[in-house]
Amino acid sequence: MRSPLWRLACSLALLSAAARALPAAKPLLGYNTWNAFRTNIDEQLIRDIADRLVELGLAAAGYTYLNIDDGWSERRRDGTGQLVAHRRRFPSGMAALAEHVHSRGLRFGIYGDAGKRTCAGYPGSRGHEGTDARTWASWGVDLLKYDNCNYDAADWDPVPRYAAMRDALNATGRPVVYSLCNWGALRPWLWADKVRHSWRTTGDIHPTWGSVMEILDASTDLARFAGPGRGHNDADMLEAVGNGKLTLGEQRAHFALWALLKSPLLIGTDLRSIHPDSLAILKAREVIAINQDPLGVAGDLVWVHGSLRIYAAPLAGGGRAVVLLNTGDAGPTNITVTWQQLGLPAGTAAGVRDLFAERDVGEFEGAVSAAATQHDVAVVKLTPLASGNSSRAADDGWRPWHQLHAQLPPRQHRPSVRGWLLAGAAAAALRLAAVAISIARWRRRVAGSGWRRLGDAHSMAAGTVQLGPAVFVGPGRVWRLVG
Ligand code: GAL
């Protein structure tokens, strides 16, 4: 077996191949079926979601990608080796469904897997990259979410598998947004920008506050790896807006923070029954504008004290987007953000606007405070006011990680040789486990249906066993074929 280091060298060479041209430079806005429906999906549901995206004003707010997740295909490819839509659940076929989605002014997304089978056990694309990319392009697919389940142990390195699909998509000539799902394994922020549009940074989100916080913590100090010309850290879908039992404050916090991290914003709740308050959060257009800001620099943590935190991002034109977060259980607490924490000269006067309320708060110099109640946020935008003739630069060069590294040591993000070695070791362990399971199965077969142990060879009296084709004397054991 080739060493992990050798594989790493090959992976890096593969990555230097042409990066995929991006049809979309901003984080995706859209809908994904997984969180609300798992594999219980069919064409009527997709049509309903497309219609609801339009009727609820979400499409107009920017949510235009409708992504069908795992479970859309038959369990087997057809006689020609092509993936086929599930015949009972998608009787009209995917091309017709894509046409309906397109007719609503939306874009059509699908799900695939870089292994032998998807995570839910449907056919994967490994070894079929060209065929599948052509199939999807012929259906009118605009987005591919590409997962990483069920690969062969010998094929454990995800980079060649992801690159193979990148090249296959490129070869179709159709612009397809390519969204990698590798759950943060092997630090995709260090290499996935050469492969695609966005990369998942963590495991799956769940509809709990704990899960939102866990992903938020795992996202600290990743902003510097994303951005214009690279791609986006994907903190997973908007599970907690509309699903589970999160308070409105928690839903607001989840939404605002994901927007600030410049994560794709993919709605994951049932739009046929969404609560108006959750809908209002998803439609908060000034918060969405932070996510889609033309400067494209992701936000990060800039200050933390006990249960209070400040996250911030620079905006085009020299402004700042700021999320003041109260992770504690105490009631409304004032959080003060200083210009120094945001890289603004202390004497700068700035207009402050509350982005959820869509209301100007006033002009401030040096600092501003806002109250956030437990598990909730205040989200503000600071716009430095031009003094005299001076106009603000489009980008004043400040980055949130400058501030973060001044307080906390940066996380180590060395090229992940260790990760690759660990993955190699894990693959070898999987191999060994598979061999051990085969041996155990063989022994069970031998003991059950075929060979039965008669006793230890040395303790059996000579002549009690008729040695012949049906008798096997193993090391110290005597076995007889039965049944
Ligand atoms: C997981 C992925 C989920 C969903 C699921 C489908 O690997 O993280 O977002 O796509 O597979 O089986």
Image (cartoon, rainbow, N blue to C red):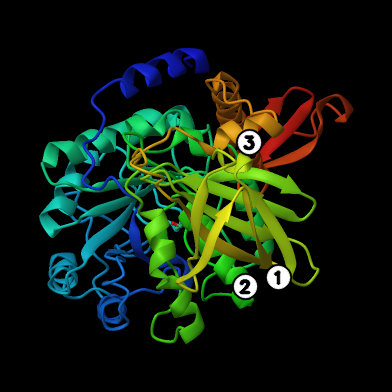
Image height of 211 relative to 313, above or below: below
- Identify which residue is drawn at 36% across, 45% down: 317
Furthest residue toward right? 459
Amino acid on which the number 2 mark rests in the picture: Gly
Between 4 and 242, the one lying in front of the other is 242
Amino acid on which the number 1 mark rests in the picture: Thr
Amino acid on which the number 3 mark rests in the picture: Leu
Image height of 234 relative to 153, above or below: below
Q: Is residue 315 left or right of residue 177?
A: right
Image height of 60 relative to 296, above or below: below
- Identify which residue is drawn at 40% across, 73% down: 283
Q: Nearer the viewer, mark 2 or mark 1?
A: 1
Q: Is residue 308 visible?
A: yes
Q: Is residue 70 visible?
A: no
Q: Is residue 287 left or right of residue 370?
A: left
Q: Is residue 398 left or right of residue 446?
A: left
* Disc 2 + disc 1, Cβ < 8 Å: yes
Residue tagged by mark 1? 373
Between 186 and 177, the one lying in front of the other is 177
Residue 112 drawn at (x, y percent):
33, 51
Instruction: Say what secondary structure mark 3 lies in.
Output: helix
Instruction: Say what secondary structure mark 2 lies in.
Output: helix
Residue tagged by mark 3? 404
Residue tagged by mark 2? 249
Label 2 to label 1, Cα distance in Å?
8 Å
Residue 473 drawn at (x, y percent):
70, 26
